[in-house]
Image (cartoon, helix red, strand yellow):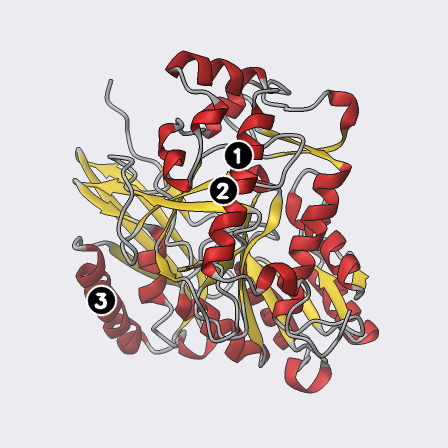
Amino acid sequence: MDDKSPFLHPQYETLSREEINRLQVERLQATVKHCMNSPFYKKRFEEIGLKPEDIKSLEDLRKMPFTTKQDLRDTYPFGMASVPLRKCVRLHSSSGTTGNPTVILHTQKDIDEWANAVARCLWMVGLRPDDVFQNSSGYGMFTGGLGFQYGAERLGALTVPAAAGNSLRQIKFMKDFGTTAVHAVPSYVTRLYEVMCDNGVDPRRDLKLKVLAIGAEPHSEEQRKRIENMLGVKAYNSFGMSEMCGPGVGFECQEQNGLHFWEDYYIVEIVDPETLEPVPDGQIGELVLTTLNREAMPLLRYRTRDLTRVLGRSCPCGRNHIRLDRMRGRSDDMIVLRGVNIFPIQIEKILMQFKELSSNYLITLTTDDDNDNMTVEVEISEMFTDDYGRLQALTKDITRALKDEILLTPRVKLVPKGSLPVSDGKAVRVVDKRKVYL
């Protein structure tokens, strides 16, 4: 392991596009054959008359049906496994607030490859074995904890499994242990900074931070820049999901010009969420992923519901793995209000442009006099709380900017700092209280 090399795994990270395509075809054919050990995929292929030997190129991927989260729920808990359960060493599960949760199985090889992928991501943004990596993410069934833990250990960094919450302890650890890198969800980074300010901690003066890894919830470029300005370090966007293993699926390099998706591990498709047909590069669509290097539970053409677009297939950093834009939201998180499609991240993008506002906001949908309405509550910085005239003008400016973005006029309420609920995990941004007429 050469600390001066920009690549942890140069044999894969520096592949040409032709080499990537050849490797993907080889691994896709092996994956499809392996999937026939899964009762789910064996039955699905038989139903449409498709055989593993019919898959000869990447174009043949479109012959295969999509896999959905509902498929995982319907086969709960182990119906999609492609190996005997005795070969599995761990499972992770996503939340199951409605119906069964989704369960993902891992062999020891799966765990090792997952650690390699996360280590590759962290190395790409400058982490090395002499760094101190603090993971402010939930452990247990949530993959962000153990995923980053094993990846940072594989890289050789000293790891601090701080877990989520207890902000004062997080800050103490950063100071006492000389933490140089932190992983956390964006909304919690903002909360940490507020606690630092309340306790007289200047992150630029009192900490040794040099890298932030942020992800697990959609966030705008404006919020990323605000976080970077707060802490004085670069914040790199991370993408992962439990169905694909967890973190390590996609990560920004130091160019910060899109998420590199590791194409030796995944085949990336972007499709229209309605027609399910491929969309041209540069057009927003739904991300679909096929695993290429998994034993326990490979997934074919998995509909992630995340919305993004292709930015390119090369990068000044020297990697030719596909680059995707930050997630614009989820097709199943879309708000439909009076026939208009709205994504919460559109609202965040506007709010973050006003320096008078903090990063905490809440969108509430209600039905009033048989009309559906949207209320956007957003906290204001302490320095702007006493000037009524200025607050009134600011409310009008925000309302106008939101209307220009989402084509509807929401109610905007500016509330004192600390008024809205905060979370140590993913922030709750939308509350839907609309009446349902049956």
Q: Nearer the viewer, residue 323 or 21?
A: 21
Q: Horizontal and vertical percent for residue 197?
A: 62, 76
Answer whether labels 2 and 1 touch (C-beta < 8 Å): yes
Mark with earlier residue (1, 3): 1
Q: Nearer the viewer, residue 58 or 41?
A: 58
> Residue reaching furthest bottom?
205
Dot 1 crowding, Cα within 10 Å, few <14, some 14–19, many 20+: many
378 to the left or right of 197: left
- Distance of label 3 from label 2 (alpha carbons): 47 Å
Residue at horizontal 42 percent and vertical 39 percent from the top: 57
Q: Secondary structure at mark 3?
A: helix
From this view, report whether residue 58 is shown above or below residue 347: above
Residue labelled with disc 3? 401
Between disc 3 and disc 2, the foreground one is 2
Numbered label attached to residue 25: 2
The three-letter code of the residue at mark 1 reads Gln
Residue labelled with disc 1? 29
Dot 2 crowding, Cα within 10 Å, few <14, some 14–19, many 20+: many
Q: Horizontal and vertical percent for residue 36?
A: 57, 21
- Image quarter hosting the N terminus: bottom right
